[in-house]
Amino acid sequence: MANTAHLHIDGRQFEFPLVTGSEQERAIDVSQLRAQTGCITLDDGYSNTGSCRSAITFIDGERGILRYRGIPIEELAEQSKFVETAYLIIYGHLPTQAEHRQFSDLLTENSLLHEDMKFHFEGFPRNAHPMAILSSMINAASCFYPDLLHTTAMKRDFDLQAARLISQVRTIAAFAYRKSRGLPIIYPKLDYKYTANFLHMMFSHPYKDFELDPEAVKALDLIFLLHADHEQNCSTSTVRMVASSRANLFASCAAGVCALWGPLHGGANQSVIEMLEDIHRAGDDGSRFIEAAKDKTSGKKLMGFGHRVYKNYDPRAKIIKKACDELLDKLHINDPLLDIAKKLEEAALKQDYFIERKLYPNVDFYSGIIMRALRIPLEMFTVIFAIGRMPGWIANFKEIMEEPAARIYRPRQIYVGPTLNHYVPIKDRK
Ligand code: ACO
């Protein structure tokens, strides 16, 4: 196979190296393109642009494959837990027993927020969206750990800062929810594991502990695990972009939360349930909505369907759909929205519009139904996604921090505005 690509511009030929990844995916290295030709590449939405080399996650969207550090998502979903998978994603290998214990202990020891952080929660209006609170409070938390701001200290204390962020994002998320409901804050318990502790902080009362159902804990842990990383998506690329300026870990990940919030990205899990509720309220079995979703003038989309990379069934959606059926069965819940979702999926997968465009359910299509069953309020769905995605963001930050040749991310543009123009004093303007 050739290892160079040739480009002809204005009668001149240029040669660029081809780069091959460990799964044989190929790229043209255009880092010398502008220097040699004076041209840049233009790739709206970055569909054809590799922004980095990364050893964390592999996706083959055509074949519906997702692997963290080489391990198929199906194996991790079946045999691992979120905390162990978080370690794998950040450190590149499955932990030994001693490493696992040490990592879990670090998470437990760092689950409490600085007590002064509590006052920051008071300033938000009661109906503030928890994603706004989450991003603000992650950034605010960095004020309490000044060492984060110094690259040498950050490298030295990376394990501690990473554990703090993974552990405290869960505490901040639960506190944000309690505040939004006017409920007293519940502190984490030292003897609860990661996911159980989150449910405890969300739903316990000062006078009565929340009764933890092992099936509920297992389902939520799986949701966290399935969201733990997904290579260069919108929020992860944002984290890398911010990190490339040498901004600190907390600031970089707070930016990731903002990017995740949008309905075309992590916010889709909330939008899916809102869509299913609308369909249910309208007495539609889904068929009217599907017609609207195909009509570009309707302003509607089938939320939870389609993906920039997957042109096949999203493997996470397959796992979540099965887990959803099992959980609702075990908890004896009959959710009409699940029936509508299944009908929508069945109908969409038969229609030319969705087949031609290779639109399949993505991770957000069924995850909301699991979260409803766990009594997690709708506005917290994207927050759950953010908690799960934290190890992926941290691992991507680490790659940037450890790359000696890393440069600040700075794309170019093709300028399409006015050519040279002159300032007109206000009295002369028409
Ligand atoms: N419903 C109806 N039509 C769709 C949908 C959908 N959900 N998704 C894509 N299409 C159509 C587009 O209109 C376009 O049609 P056209 O070729 O006739 O113009 C075609 O399919 C290709 O879609 P693009 O917009 O090019 O896909 P892109 O890669 O830019 O966007 C995205 C991917 C944002 C996920 C899109 O499919 C979408 O908006 N889906 C719904 C929101 C959603 O579920 N987001 C979560 C994604 S997963 C995640 O971020 C965790």
Image: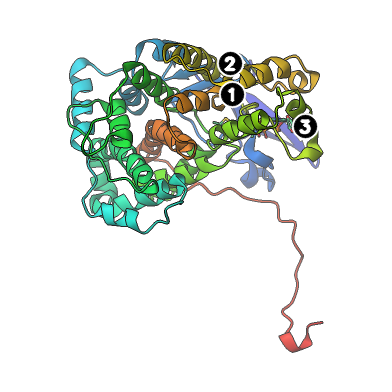
**Ligand 1 closer than 8 Å to the CB at disc 1?**
no
Q: Is residue 292 something that shows in the picture?
A: yes
> Hey, what amino acid is under mark 2?
Gly
Q: Position of residue 237 (x, y in %)?
A: 51, 39
User: Nearer the viewer's eye, disc 1 or disc 2?
Assistant: 1
Mark 1 and mark 2: Cα distance apart in space: 26 Å
> Hey, what amino acid is under mark 3?
Ala
Quadrant holding the N terminus: top right
User: Nearer the viewer's eye, disc 2 or disc 3?
Assistant: 3
**Ligand 1 closer than 8 Å to the CB at disc 3?**
no
In this figure, which colouring scheme has been used for the structure?
Answer: rainbow
Mark found first going from the N terminus, 2 or 3: 2
What secondary structure is marked by label 1?
A: helix
Mark found first going from the N terminus, 3 or 1: 3
Mark 2 and mark 3: Cα distance apart in space: 27 Å
Q: Position of residue 54 (x, y in %)?
A: 46, 29
Q: Is residue 250 above or below residue 389?
A: below
Left or right of 66 in this view: 174:
left
Q: Which residue is mark 3?
A: 292
Quadrant of the image where one finds ligand 1? top right
Q: Which residue is mark 1?
A: 337
Mark 3 and mark 1: Cα distance apart in space: 19 Å
